[in-house]
Image (cartoon, rainbow, N blue to C red):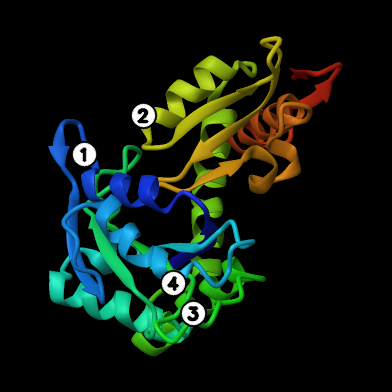
Amino acid sequence: MIAKGKSISHGTAALEYDLAKEINGEVAATEIHRHELFGCTGEEMVQEMKPYFVDFPNVKNNCLRFEVSPSVEESAGMTDADWAKLGNDFMQRMGLMNHQYIIVKHSGTEKNSRQAHLHILANRVSLSGELYKDNWIGKRATEAANSIARERNLVQSKDIGKANREEIKQAMDGILARMQGFDLAEFSRELEKLGFRVREARASTGKLNGYYVTSRSGTEYKASEIGKGYTLAHIEKTQKNLKYNSISRNYGNTLKPKDGGLHL
């Protein structure tokens, strides 16, 4: 399970997005639980939070926003009650049960229609008027998620990331070993066929600086996170080595690399 967290100043916009989420024209948002909020819209609910802000006029980021994502396999059989329990468990571990908050489930993402997850918006000021410290909030969210994962025997975020990167690496290696020479467009098409998506990273001038790969579970990784040998600067060499090793296995030790090519 993965969790992200940050403090934000745009609470109304974030909550309106959470409540109105659609994927391919279909409603994807379901309100799961709310605490001490009564409005019908995101704007109305954030208005209910504002009286608590007055004692902290210099605090710009007065809302907290979290995303909690079990793996696709773990969330497949979860009911709305299960999601509410998960969200409230997370908020308790974050020390936010005495704050106004709302939990909204999204049934998927644009990248993965099966990747259900929670969005939580909370007042940074508690009902008793205390300002929640937001230092290291992302790290604390990850620790809370990992704590829940350990207790429920779920996959922890670090293990999901490791498994995702290894799955991407194996797919890349298989494609590179089959290619006659490296071509990013062909490489991207072949990865797409296997359920991975490639996004190019370009400068404002249009220069290609690198690329990202999205795992089957919906998390995006820079090429360098898969391995140094998969960055644009090194992937051609990686491709040649994988091609050579693949042919060597098929033909024994009769092949020798020479001048970037393969020779009998």
Circle 2: residue type: Lys
* Tags 3 and 4 touching, CB below 8 Å: no
Q: Looking at the image, which residue sits at the far right?
A: 259
Viewed as shown, does residue 60 lie left or right of 38? right
| Structural crowding at the residue carrying mark 4, measured as other residues with C-alpha within 10 Å and reported as few (<14), some (14–19) or many (≥20) | some
According to the picture, the residue beneath numbered tag 1 turns out to be 22
Where residue 238 appears, as percent x and y from the top left, is: 72, 33
Which SS class for mark 1? Answer: strand
The answer to which of marks 1 and 4 sits earlier in the sequence is 1
According to the picture, the residue beneath numbered tag 2 turns out to be 193
| Structural crowding at the residue carrying mark 3, measured as other residues with C-alpha within 10 Å and reported as few (<14), some (14–19) or many (≥20) | some
Q: Which residue is found at the position 28% from the left and 66% from the top?
A: 103
Q: Which residue is found at the position 68% from the left and 36% from the top?
A: 230
Which SS class for mark 2? Answer: helix
Q: Can you tell which quarter of the image residue 75 is in?
A: bottom left
Q: CA distance from mark 2 to mark 3?
A: 36 Å
According to the picture, the residue beneath numbered tag 4 turns out to be 52
According to the picture, the residue beneath numbered tag 3 turns out to be 144
Circle 3: residue type: Ala
